Structures are given as C-alpha cells and as structure tokens.
C-alpha cells in the first residue's frame, strides 16, 4: 500500500517516508494529501474551451477552428483582413499585413471631422464607423460594392451626432454605441434631476428605430463591446472612478464588473472562445483581462513586453490587434506570451484596429425571429425582449407614454424616487439604484459592506462594495489572501490589493504550488535544498546521477537486476551465470591493470597488458623474452623520435653555416683570366687567403704545400704580373701594357704591386 496515496510518489527509507505529488496534482496543506490541479482555472491554459481531467486537462477548439501548435486557427485564416483607422482614414490590409502588399482605402473624412470607432457586420458585408463633429454620426459602406469609389454609403440613426464607439450585434441586427450628446427630449429623470450628457444607445442596422438605452452613467462612457451569444454588453467609463460595467443587451442586469487598477480604459473586446473580456488602458499601458463572471482579473500584456499607450483593440485567433496614436498598429499573443509586434503599415496616428473574417462572428439562432416588437427587439441572457423608446414603457405589448403629472400620481416616493405607471397601468415608485421598496424606503448600502468597505450604488438594485486593502468579495467579507498561498506559503497584499506569496524553500510558483523537485529530479521522489538554494536529489537505490537520471540496472545487459537494500546498490545475475555489480563485458575482465577493448567485429573483449603481465586477461607474469621484446619495442618507440629530432636540428645548423659562408665569399671573388680564349687559373696565396675554407682541389696550379720563405723577396709576386710589367718596359707600346695592368688589379692596390715588382 502506498502510504502517500494513489496520487503521489513514495520514497521510503529505513526511518523516513518522502511523498511527492504526481504531475497534475498538488498538496493540500490542511490534510497533506495530493489533490487534482484544475489547470482550466489557470490563465492561458487553452485558447478556446478547456476541460479538466484527473491529473491533466484537455483543450478543445470551436467549430470551424483547428488545433495547431497549442492554438486554435480558423479555417481559411489567410483570408483575414486588418482595418486600421486614424482620425481621417480607414485602410484595409490583406494578410500578412504589410504596407508594401496590396491595401485599400475604405473611407476618408474631412479634417474638421474625426473617426472615433469602427466595427464590421460580416453577414451584411459592411464596415461601419462612427465620427464626431462635422459630419458626426454613424456611417456604413458595403465592402464589395460594384462602384469603385463609394464614400459614406449609408447613415445609421442620423439624429445622433456624437457617437464615441460602436459595437455590432450580428445576431439580432442591431448596433450599440456610447454617446456624448445631450438629451433634447423628455425623460422621467429630467423632471427633478439635471439632464444627463452621456448614454448607451441602440438602433437598428437596417431600420429607423434608435433610442437611448441607459443614461445614468457616472462618468464618460467610452469603449463598448457586445457578446450576442450570451446576450450581454460591456462598456468602459472614464472619470474620477474609472470602471467597466456590464448589462444585458436589453438594458437590464446592469452591474460594475471591474473597478480596480483602471485609469483610462479606452479599448474593449470580447473573446467569445475563452469566455473572457479584454480591455486596453491608455494611461497604464496595459491590456487586462477578466472572466465573464468577474473573476480572475489579470494583466495580460504590459509595458515590459513593449506595449505603449494602446487605444483600441480587437481579437482574432490567439492574437490581440491594437492601435495607438504614438506607436501605430501592433499585435501580441492574447495570453501575454512573447513581446509586442509592431506592424509596418505606414499609417500615422492610428486610433483603431479591426479584423474581418467569416469565422470571427459566430453564427447563432436569432431569438428575435420568434417575437413581434413594436419598436426594438433586444437580446438578453434568457433570449430576447421588446423594448420601447426612451420615455415610454411596454404595456400589453404596446409602447405607452408614461408622462404623468404630479396631481395624477398620489404615491409619495422617498429618497428621490419617482412615481410612474407600470406595464399593467398601476402606479409605483421608480427608485434610485441603491434604494428599493414600495416607497424607495430601503437603503441597500446600510451596513452592507464589511471590513471598512465603501458602498457604491448599483443599477441592479444591489449595492457594490469598494473594499479596503486586503479584503475582497461581494461585501468585503473575505480576505484577499484566503486560501491563496499553498504549501505553507505566507501571503502579503500589494498596493493594488493583489495577493503574492512568500514560499517555503522547497516550493515555488506565484502561489507556491510547485514543488522545487518537480521535474528536476528525473526518477527521484525527494530532494534536499541547500542554504544557497541548490537542489540535491535523493535517489532511489536503482538510480544514480545528479538528477537520478541513470538507471543502474542498465549495467546488467539483459541479466536479472537485483536491488540490494543492505548495500544500497544493485547486483546483476548475468546471462553467463556471473553474479556481479555489472554484466558489461569489459567490467573486471582484464587483471593487473590491463586495458580492455571490445573487438569491433566479434564484440569479444581483448586485453592490452602492461609490460610485466601477459595472457588473454593479463592474468600471469610475462616471460623474460617477452619482457625484453616489450622493452625493445618501448625503446624503439622512444629512440626513433629522438633521432629524427636530432637530425632535424643538425640540418638546420648546417644550413645556417652555409648561408653565412656564402655571404662572406661575396666580398672578394676570383675571376678567371682569359688568354687567347683559354682560362688561366693562377694559384696565388694572396687571393686564396680571402677564400676561407675553400676546397683544395680548386686552383690546381697552387701547390698544396705552399710555404712562405721570409727571406725571399718575391713571396707575394706574381710571375704573370711581373712579366707583363717587364714587357711593358721593353715594349714601345708601353701604354697598352699599363692599361692591361690596370685591368688586372684594382686601383687601390696598384701602388703596392708596383713596389713589389720593382
């Protein structure tokens, strides 16, 4: 029985038991048991759907997508088109999005106007954009129109002149936008309160009906996104307390979704496949993400990855596409893997980025086909509902005017509530979001937030708490560190109210969820951590090596491997009957220091014995003859290289001496005399003294035993010179003789010769 449980490895010694959770499991610090890790709760585990299984998980791609390199790629992915907008132009770029490739100008507006947002409607083959100032409004254009140039092909909801951002509901055929226009007609809010400047609006894409849907926004509504499949919409609010809100697409179920770590959220996009909402914060230079239920808020991309002031963002496959006025268009992996890639599109001051592809907008049944509405049919999580224009309510399927005089309404509404008529024609109080009751007498914020939390009004009828540092939960009843750090880690809270862990030495990870030895020690079930943080594996008997990566039983080479617990080692019962620590052929084969080698052809071990030993295994002393042979062989091996070295040195020395001799002989060189065409060689010791070390065979006329008689006056006389000189004296043409003498001797020794002859 495994004392560590079925989900753990066990290493049991004589006195201790070491347990290590298997991959996909983690230790529960309360009961010390290994429990399954839900990898699907970890941000970025799967691109689309994630299914948790025991000890692992499984990723599934949606229909019309296929798995590739742990990502979900759309069929026909290369057909995607990237639309980029700045203040005045919208340009389309085909994949792979380069300015040098084919691109198209979709729209151009005048300089006194400004493009504020854009979206696409794939079923209607339309690109839609919003502008402010002159002209201000929502425009559309057919993408595959037969006309070559078609500017501002259509106008949607022309009475609204200042849209900030737009989002297309491709299932019901509506368009939502954030608006900065003032109210110019009646609303029940305007009787007692200041008219509201900002609103969330909705209208038909192919019809005339448009209205303000939500008007009580505590700040400037900026970016907007819709999720028609869920019937929900989301928008950002910029102000003193910037936040992100959500509501059903019919205006109900409104609540604040994100209100921490936000400054200027200017971009918003829904990832239907990973069930997450992504936003871009222009001031913080981050892209954040949160699940649709409001949990698991994370920073996906930050300035550390090269992100700088993102404005609008869009998402397709595994990439977030975005634009910023300072850096241009970019893309980055949606889970923050890798750095931001800036696209070379040559577009100045980009504001928006948008991907167009047939499988980006998921087809779903349209619940509005089952309803007949007088004004608008809007989606919600349970299906769809009919909605009336602002200032009217739906009574018995008809949009009726709710304007009532104070004399008609006899109800007294407290806390700012207003008397209205409901769908059945009954009078009731319409309360502010933080109040309820027949007379709006109940304050939902009273003692609602715990641990010093601040209560904020909610449009759902339930309050929302802004918790103090270190607390979280719907009413601040939980500490941020509750069950956050695992395996004995100590939890602290950052200034942004985010928990972080100080782990024990043997654990690591953002929640101390990973055992340091996990995947480090290959076959080890435990390890020790030194003071310097280094890991030392505690290997089982069968394994060895720094990471327990070597199996000792490999030594047995097919023999039976026996683990000897007494010696903490293995014993091999080899196939040849040998019982030893190894069955390797060379192990222990050669004796007395012999070196073992395997014959490459027969695989039989062969021993190379030392000088004093012989035999097939070097098992007996070598005979004397063998010794002398060995000595002779060794001597030859030593002497031959020495002889070659000495020969080389000698050759070099001789060569140097010859070079020096050649240089000296160039000083005075004998030249033969020609007399009647015959060379006359004269042996003259005066010449020979300049020729150092010459061969005695040269100059045959010179007596080898030549000696100098000190008493003889003609020791250094030359008979030829003397004869020529004497003939010159006796000859009439003495001038010719003198010239011959001058030719025979250099001028410098001419005087000496004369004296000698005389």
Image (cartoon, rainbow, N blue to C red):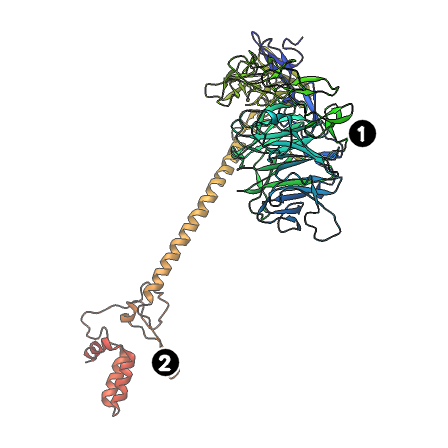
- Residue under circle 2? 674
Which of 190/150 is in front? 190
Q: Residue 30 at what x, y percent from top left?
A: 58, 9
Q: Residue 212 at what x, y percent from top left?
A: 66, 31
- Res 385 visible: no
- Res 159 visible: yes
Q: Quadrant of residue 390?
A: top right
Which circle's residue, 2 or 1, is located before the other in the chain?
1
Which of 266/55 is in front? 266
Lateral position of residue 147 relative to residue 749, left or right: right
- The residue furthest top is 15
Badge 1 density bin: few <14, some 14–19, many ≥20, Cα 10 Å: few
Lateral position of residue 660 relative to residue 314, left or right: left
Which of 217/321 is in front? 217
Q: Which mark is residue 269?
A: none
In the displayed structure, would residue 330 be above or below residue 730? above
Badge 2 density bin: few <14, some 14–19, many ≥20, Cα 10 Å: few
Q: Residue 342 at what x, y percent from top left?
A: 57, 42
- Residue under circle 1? 372
Q: Secondary structure at mark 1?
A: loop
Residue at image coords 50%, 23%: 496
- The residue furthest front is 407
Q: Residue 645 at what x, y percent from top left?
A: 44, 47
Q: Secondary structure at mark 2?
A: strand
Mark 2 or 1: in front is 1
Residue at image coords 37%, 57%: 656
* Distance from Cα at disc 2 to Cα at disc 1: 140 Å
């Amino acid at each position: 029985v495994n004392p560590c449980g079925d989900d753990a490895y066990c290493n049991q010694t004589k006195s201790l038991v070491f347990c290590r959770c298997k991959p996909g499991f983690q230790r529960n610090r309360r009961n010390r048991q290994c429990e399954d890790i839900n990898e699907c709760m970890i941000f970025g585990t799967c691109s689309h759907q994630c299914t948790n299984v025991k000890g692992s998980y499984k990723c599934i791609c949606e229909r019309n997508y296929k798995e590739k390199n742990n990502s979900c790629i759309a069929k026909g992915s290369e057909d995607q088109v990237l639309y980029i907008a700045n203040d005045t132009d919208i340009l389309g770029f085909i994949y792979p999005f380069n300015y040098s490739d084919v691109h198209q100008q979709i729209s151009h507006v005048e300089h006194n106007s400004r493009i504020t947002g854009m979206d696409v409607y794939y079923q209607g083959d339309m690109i839609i954009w919003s502008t402010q100032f002159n002209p201000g409004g929502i425009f559309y254009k057919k993408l595959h129109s037969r006309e070559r140039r078609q500017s501002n092909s259509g106008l949607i909801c022309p009475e609204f002149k200042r849209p900030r951002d737009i989002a297309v509901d491709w299932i019901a055929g509506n368009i939502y936008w954030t608006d900065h226009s003032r109210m110019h007609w009646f609303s029940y809010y305007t009787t007692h309160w200041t008219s509201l400047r900002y609103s969330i609006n909705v209208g038909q894409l192919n019809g005339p009906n448009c209205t303000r849907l939500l008007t009580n926004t505590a700040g400037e509504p900026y970016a907007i996104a819709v999720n028609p499949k869920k019937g929900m919409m989301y928008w950002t609010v910029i102000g003193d307390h910037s936040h992100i809100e959500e509501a059903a697409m019919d205006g109900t179920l409104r609540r604040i979704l994100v209100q921490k770590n936000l400054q200027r959220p200017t971009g918003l996009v829904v990832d239907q496949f990973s069930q997450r909402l992504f936003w871009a914060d222009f001031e913080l230079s981050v892209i954040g993400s949160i699940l649709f239920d409001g949990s698991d808020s994370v920073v996906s991309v930050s300035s550390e990855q090269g992100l700088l002031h993102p404005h609008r963002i869009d998402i397709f496959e595994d990439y977030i596409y975005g634009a910023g006025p300072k850096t241009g268009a970019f893309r980055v992996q949606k889970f923050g893997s890798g750095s931001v890639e800036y696209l070379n599109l040559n577009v100045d001051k980009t504001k928006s980025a948008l991907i167009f592809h047939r499988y980006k907008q998921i087809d779903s049944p349209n619940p509005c086909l089952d309803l007949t509405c007088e004004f608008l049919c809007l989606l919600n999580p349970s299906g769809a509902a009919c909605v009336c224009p602002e200032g009217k309510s739906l009574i018995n399927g008809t949009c009726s005017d709710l304007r009532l005089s104070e004399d008609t309404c006899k109800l007294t509404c407290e806390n700012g509530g207003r008397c209205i008529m409901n769908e059945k024609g009954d009078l009731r109080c319409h309360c502010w979001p933080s109040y309820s009751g027949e007379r709006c007498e109940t304050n939902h914020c009273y003692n609602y937030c715990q641990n010093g939390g601040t209560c904020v009004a909610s449009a759902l009828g339930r309050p929302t708490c802004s918790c103090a540092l270190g607390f979280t939960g719907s009413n601040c009843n939980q500490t941020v560190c509750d069950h956050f750090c695992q395996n004995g880690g100590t939890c602290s809270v950052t200034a942004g109210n985010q928990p972080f862990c100080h782990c024990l030495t043997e654990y690591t990870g953002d929640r101390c969820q990973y055992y340091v030895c996990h995947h480090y020690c290959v076959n080890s079930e435990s390890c020790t951590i030194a003071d310097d943080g280094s890991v030392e594996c505690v290997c089982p008997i069968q394994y060895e090596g720094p990471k327990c990566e070597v199996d000792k039983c490999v030594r047995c080479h097919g023999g039976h491997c026996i683990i000897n617990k007494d010696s903490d080692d293995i014993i091999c019962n080899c196939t040849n009957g040998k019982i030893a620590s190894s069955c390797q052929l060379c192990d222990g084969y050669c004796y007395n220091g012999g070196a073992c080698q395997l014959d490459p052809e027969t695989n039989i071990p062969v021993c190379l014995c030392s000088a004093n030993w012989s035999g097939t295994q070097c098992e007996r002393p070598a005979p004397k003859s063998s010794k002398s042979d060995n000595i002779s062989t060794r001597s030859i091996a030593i002497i031959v290289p020495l002889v070659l070295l000495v020969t080389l040195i000698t050759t070099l020395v001789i060569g140097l001496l010859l070079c020096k001799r050649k240089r000296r002989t160039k000083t005075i060189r004998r030249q033969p005399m020609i007399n009647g065409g015959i060379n006359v060689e004269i042996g003259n010791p005066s010449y020979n003294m300049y020729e150092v070390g010459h061969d005695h065979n040269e100059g045959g006329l010179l007596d080898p035993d030549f000696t100098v008689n000190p008493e003889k006056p003609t020791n250094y006389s030359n008979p030829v010179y003397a004869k020529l000189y004497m003939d010159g004296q006796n000859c009439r043409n003495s001038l010719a003789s003198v010239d011959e003498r001058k030719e025979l001797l250099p001028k410098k020794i001419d005087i000496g010769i004369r004296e000698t002859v005389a």
